[in-house]
Image (cartoon, grey):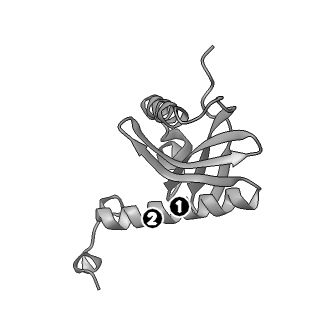
């Protein structure tokens, strides 16, 4: 038993390792969900100086950049509301770094897997491309 497991902590004050384990479990569930729907994993937890993308998948010839958000409930807007404009900018910059490896550039989209109270919601094309 870990030293912190016996403590009475508020739900939001979980130790970092516990939060990371929950995030990992959410990503595992999201990956399985998308693979069951025919998407193919290309890369997981792609990191660069601009940020991180949880999952990079392929759907036919299209690249899908996937953000995974896990929330215990829909309180405060839920998982989908947690993807702020600042987070969207970081996702775009990180995707640009990833795409520097590709020529010609494939069609791309940004999806969100929102996991709330144990239910998975797949929101496609969450970031509109600038003209």
Q: Is residue 116 visible?
A: yes
Which residue is under mark 2?
Answer: 22
Residue 22: percent from left, percent from top: 45, 64
Quarter of the rendering containing residue 86: top left
SS state under label 2? helix
Instruction: Name the residue nearer the viewer: 25 or 114.
Output: 25
> Residue 66, which numbered label?
none
Instruction: Name the residue nearer the viewer: 86 or 95.
Output: 95
Residue 55: percent from left, percent from top: 56, 50
Residue drawn 49% across the image and 49% down it: 75
Quarter of the rendering containing residue 29: bottom right
Q: Residue furthest left?
A: 3
SS state under label 1? helix
Kindly indicate whether the residue at mark 1 contacts the one at mark 2 (C-beta within 8 angstroms). yes
Residue drawn 45% across the image and 60% down it: 23
Residue 126: percent from left, percent from top: 62, 34
Residue drawn 49% across the image and 32% down it: 88
Residue drawn 53% across the image and 47% down it: 79
Q: Quadrant of the C terminus?
A: top right
Q: Quadrant of the N terminus?
A: bottom left
Q: Residue furthest bottom?
A: 1
Judge the density around disc 1: few (<14), some (14-19), many (≥20) Cα neighbours within 10 Å.
many
> Residue 26, which numbered label?
1
Give the mark count: 2
């Amino acid at each position: 038993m870990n030293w912190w497991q016996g403590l009475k902590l508020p739900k939001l004050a979980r130790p970092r390792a516990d939060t990371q384990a929950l995030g990992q479990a959410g990503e595992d569930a999201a990956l399985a969900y998308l693979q069951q729907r025919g998407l193919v994993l290309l890369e997981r937890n792609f990191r660069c100086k601009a940020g991180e993308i949880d999952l990079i998948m392929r759907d036919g010839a299209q690249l899908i950049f996937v953000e995974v958000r896990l929330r215990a409930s829909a309180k405060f807007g839920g998982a989908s509301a947690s993807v702020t404009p600042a987070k969207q900018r970081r996702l775009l910059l990180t995707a640009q770094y990833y795409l520097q490896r590709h020529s010609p550039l494939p069609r791309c989209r940004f999806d969100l897997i929102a996991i709330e109270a144990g239910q998975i919601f797949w929101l496609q094309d969450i970031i509109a491309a600038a003209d």
